[in-house]
Amino acid sequence: GENVEQHPSTLSVQEGDSAVIKCTYSDSASNYFPWYKQELGKRPQLIIDIRSNVGEKKDQRIAVTLNKTAKHFSLHITETQPEDSAVYFCAAFDDYKLSFGAGTTVTVRA
Amino acid sequence: KAGVTQTPRYLIKTRGQQVTLSCSPISGHRSVSWYQQTPGQGLQFLFEYFSETQRNKGNFPGRFSGRQFSNSRSEMNVSTLELGDSALYLCASSLGGTEGEQYFGPGTRLTVT
């Protein structure tokens, strides 16, 4: 089955700096890669996604890149703000199933 | 549009009991997936239903089961509860296509004592 690895597990950045989270997947059949943000006590929220036929997608301060050959994808957050502090999960979709990375706890220092 | 709803939000059960959790998807969504979230194992896929049919199932014991009704609402059942079943159970709804944009409900926090 699909195996998604996510790094780093924790990330502390100064407000205004950029944050990068990287994920790798194992199953070349995976065709859709969403990113979720989960604040403490809340549900995972879909923040951005990318499909296998696209290399990069941007939405305001967040962007995602996908390298299908290397089977890795990354989340980039620019100009980080305190409200970006949360746990971020990457996932890979195949056969109607999302396989998640272990999560990255992002802390934005004021 | 109303979001995904789950009931109940919190449950406390005793080992050996069984429990049923409910999920109502976003209107128009025909697929419901269930996930278990724990600090140790993260987010793990339980099963997915589309038009009352299970299309995929994760690596969980047979004590975990689910079903979907004709109105797309879904239930999951856990029988013979064990302490290790304590977790946040999340459902997610989607249109059901081959590219799975999924939206999560608030979850049901299950505590087994």
Image (cartoon, rainbow, N blue to C red):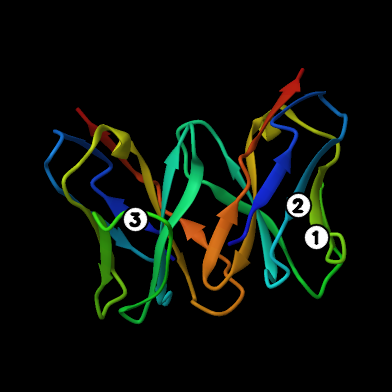
Residue at 66 percent of width and 58 percent of height: A34
Residue at 50 percent of width and 46 percent of height: B43
2 or 3: mark nearer the eye = 2
- Mark linked to residue A71: 1
Numbered disc 2: what chain?
A
Quarter the C terminus of chain A occupies: top right
Q: Furthest-top residue in view?
A: A110
Q: Is residue B101 left or right of residue B39?
A: right
> Residue A4's x, y, as percent?
66, 51
1 or 3: mark nearer the eye = 1
Residue type beneath disc 3: Thr
As helix, strand or loop, the secondary structure at mark 3 comes to strand
> Residue B77's x, y, as percent?
22, 56
The answer to whether B79 is drawn above or below residue A83 in the figure is below
As helix, strand or loop, the secondary structure at mark 1 comes to loop
Residue at 35 percent of width and 82 percent of height: B51
Measured in 3D between alpha carbons, the distance from the residue under mark 2 to the one under mark 3, in whole angstroms, is 32 Å
Does residue A70 appear in this view? yes
According to the picture, the residue beneath numbered tag 2 turns out to be A24
Does residue B26 appear in this view? no
